[in-house]
Image (tube, grey):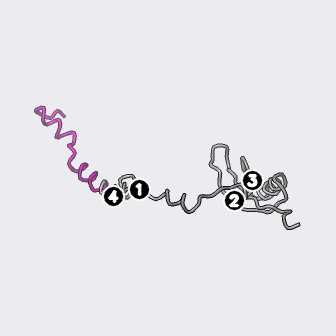
Amino acid sequence: MSNFYQEFEVFSKKTDTAPMQYQFSLLAPNHEIALVMAQENFMRRETVADIWVVKRADIRKMTQEEKQSLSRLDNKEYRTTKGYGYLKKKWRQYEQEMLDEKEIMSWGGELKQ
């Protein structure tokens, strides 16, 4: 009787184009009952476009060795937005140096009004 219930993870999305989001875990005897339980939970709260139930035992996570491969091999801070903090100051300086229409027109001779 101890193996009767299995752990399931529930995912849903609000619209057909929305990404799947993790919602909660539940205990159920099989996939069909898990899906019915997930539907019952959502029908009382909000509308959804799709619900997935996945047996927790079928989800594979990374090992410690595999997680080490996720660390950066080299310093590439230019790929993150924090490396571009100077751009606001540079853009402001560029805007201040921009020529206005009157100045450009004055290069051609007399300014027509």
Is disc 2 placed on a helix, strand or loop? strand
For the image, the number of numbered tags is 4
Q: Amino acid at mark 1?
A: Leu
Question: Which is closer to the viewer, label 3 or label 2?
Answer: 3
Is disc 1 placed on a helix, strand or loop? loop
Q: CA distance from mark 1 to mark 4?
A: 24 Å
* Residue labelled with disc 1: 73
Q: Sequence order check: which comes first, mark 3 or mark 1?
A: 3
Q: Is residue 55 left or right of residue 81?
A: right
Q: Sequence order check: which comes first, mark 4 or mark 2?
A: 2
* Residue labelled with disc 4: 85
Q: Amino acid at mark 4?
A: Gly
How far across and how far down the image is residue 85, in percent? 33, 58
Question: Which is closer to the viewer, label 3 or label 1?
Answer: 1
How far across and how far down the image is residue 71, in percent? 46, 59
* Residue labelled with disc 3: 53
Q: Residue at x 21, y 42 (%)?
A: 100
* Residue labelled with disc 2: 23
Q: Farthest residue in the right direction?
A: 1
Magenta stretch, main secondary structure class: helix
The magenta stretch spans residue 39: no
Q: Is residue 12 left or right of residue 78?
A: right
Q: Amino acid at mark 2?
A: Gln
Residue stretch in magenta: 88-113
